[in-house]
Structure formats: structure tokens, C-alpha cells
Image (spheres, rainbow, N blue to C red):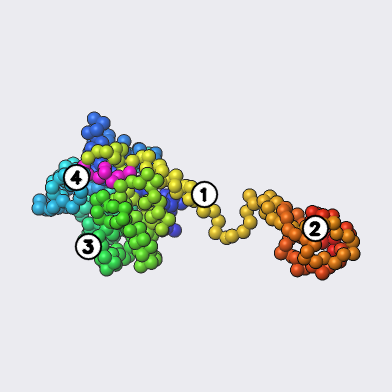
Amino acid sequence: MSFLKELSGEANPFIIAEIGVNYYDIAEKYGISVIEAAKKMILSALESGAHAVKFQSYKAGKIASKNSPAYWDQTEEPTNSQYELFKKFDHFGEEEYRELARFTEKTGGIFCSTPFDFGSADYLEELMPFYKISSSDITNLPFIRHISEKGKPVLLSTGASTIGEIERAVAAVEETGNTRICIMHCVLSYPTMFEDANLNMIKHLRAVFPDYISGYSDHTRPDFSMMVLTTAWLYGAQVIEKHFTLDKTLKGNDHYHAMDPDDLKIFVNNCKMIKEINGQYRKEPLACETGSRKQARRSIVAVRNLNEGEILSKDMVTFKRPGAGISPGELEKVLGRKLKKNLPEDEFLTWEHL
């Protein structure tokens, strides 16, 4: 059984709303505490159709040096260094994430937080059923092994990675005996332009790693029809992750490329619609076609009054709806045969006439 079924039954795609650290700005907007804002976002994400919510567990001093330059769009997030940015949003620790995990479980969802250091990876172990490894740690093989040894499914994000780097990361997971892996296409650019999304890479990852589940972690700005996420799913991404916010107009951090509840609902409805219209694989007449199968097809009919004893020739007949008589496909079987009773003009030829 796929670990996705273990997590969420038949859910496909498995949708992860990455709240990240967006709840800090939401708290300020609504005048509530950061823990209340995080819970507000959890409820909204789950009510809008997400199966899981995801946070980020880090401390600035453990993830980045004080001389770590920005690599995001600074017109949206003006902070000059990674350390400065992470310092703004690293107030939560084990106690807060335990509270959020309990809240998420109570509301019917799945809690997850991406760990960015060994300590957070350890305390998160009992709080969540799978691990997500950031693209930034794709070459951090000691960290990948440490996480993989815990035996939980591993979602491996592959932003800015070569196939060789991904293969080494996958091998690091496999070395621990863990084979429950999801390899997620990702573009490490904030925001990702549509022309840079390169969703065809999902197909490539599926071809290179056919034994593992494929996923997609998205950083594009939400399009009005959520076509990016929908296409990623159609291309084989069974896990879909995207940043989530309650207000896409907020400045800073991940709001500017996040989906909001309405975007998420559109994506969920797209998936439901596609599943509904996909139907079965085997081509055969459907129950809904029973009437039209007969009424919309044609039969062999007489072009004039035909008398008993006449030998049927091609100029005596034509083909008209409905398909209540002999099919035009049987024409060669009736030509040259003698009528044993009269056939009025525009009447269907039946086998009883021959």
C-alpha cells in the first residue's frame, strides 16, 4: 500500500498547504496572537480542501550565517539577508508545534513541519507521520540520513538540483532501509515565473525514479484557474504542496506567491471535475448511450416502393435514421437477394423481408 493511502486513504492528489511562517503577518493583520493566527490558518486550509498543513521549524542561528545574502524578490520581501529574515520568524519551538499538531489532528487534518536542524527533526518525530526535506538540504546528506533513519515517509524537494544530486539524496535515504520516498519537482525561485515552472520535469523525474511517488512543490503566483497545480497533477504529481495565506496582498515572506482559500477551492474542484470526467479506461458503449446508440444510427431503407420478388440492387436503397432496421454495414449481405414481401418507400429493410 502506498504511504499516501496510509496517510489519507484514497486522496489523490495529496494536498499540503504550506503555512510556513505566514501566520506572523496574519496575526498582525487580525490583531491576534501568532498561535491563534496559526490555528486560524490551519482551519481555513483544511476547510478549503487541504489534507495536510505544513510549517517550518528553525532557529536563525542554526540555519544561516549572519552573512547569508537574500535570493528572493526584494521588491516583495525587502530583508537583506537570510539570517535577518529567519530571525523575524523563529519564535516557535517544540512546545508551540506540539500545540499546533494536537490542534490539527483534532480538526481532522495532518500536521507537518519541515525541520532545518537535527534538534527540530528529533522533536518533530512524534508529531507528524512524514518528513518534508527542503530543497536547500538536498546535498545535506548527513541530515537526510538522520531523518530517514526514523523510518517515516520522506518527501524530498528537488529545487535547483541536478539528477546526480537527487540520486545521491535518494541513495542516502535508501541506505537507511527507507524506501517510502516522494520526489518532488520544485523551482527554487521566489516567485517562479510561469515560463520557469518546467512542469515537464515531473515526467522526467517519474522516468528516472519509476519506483517512487512524484510530487510538486510550487512557487508560482496563483493563476485564476489554478492551471499550474492542475497540470502538475495531470503530469503525475501525486503530492501537491503550495504556500498558503489568508491575504495575498500582504508584503513580505511568502504571501506574494501563496494560494488563498479561494485558490485552493478552485484547485480541489478542478481535481474533482477531472476525476469525474475521466471515467473508465476501457472503450465500450455506456448506459447513457443506449437510446442514442439506436436512434442516431442508420438503417437500410427503400428509395421507392419495392415489390415482392424484386432482386435488391444498390440503387433501390439508401441509409436513414434511426437504426431500427438492418445496418448499412450489412449492405453486401443483402444486395442480390430477393424480396419475399413488399417494402414500401422509406421503410426499413429487415431480415424478414429477404
How many numbered circles are shown? 4
Q: Nearer the viewer, mark 3 or mark 1?
A: 1
Q: Position of residue 31 (x, y in %)?
A: 24, 30
Nearest to N terminus: mark 1 or mark 4: 4
Tag 1: residue type?
Answer: Glu
Separation (CA) of disc 1 from disc 4: 42 Å
Residue drawn at x 59%, y 60% is 283
- Which residues are drawn in magenta? 252-259
Separation (CA) of disc 3 from disc 4: 29 Å
Q: Quadrant of the N terminus?
A: bottom left
315 or 110: nearer the viewer: 315
Which type of secondary structure does the marked residue at label 4 adopt?
A: loop
Q: Describe residue 305's horizontal placement relative to residue 42 as left or right.
A: right
Residue drawn at x 23%, y 37% is 25
Nearest to N terminus: mark 3 or mark 2: 3
Which type of secondary structure does the marked residue at label 2 adopt?
A: strand
Separation (CA) of disc 3 from disc 2: 79 Å
Main SS of the magenta segment? Answer: loop
289 or 134: nearer the viewer: 289
The residue tagged 2 is 302
The residue tagged 1 is 276
The residue tagged 4 is 75
Tag 3: residue type?
Answer: Thr
Q: Describe residue 262's horizontal placement relative to residue 343 as left or right.
A: left
Q: Nearer the viewer, mark 3 or mark 4?
A: 4
Q: Position of residue 87 (x, y in %)?
A: 15, 44
Q: Nearer the viewer, mark 3 or mark 2?
A: 2
Other-residue count near label 2 (Cα within 10 Å), few / some / many at <14 / 14–19 / ≥20: many
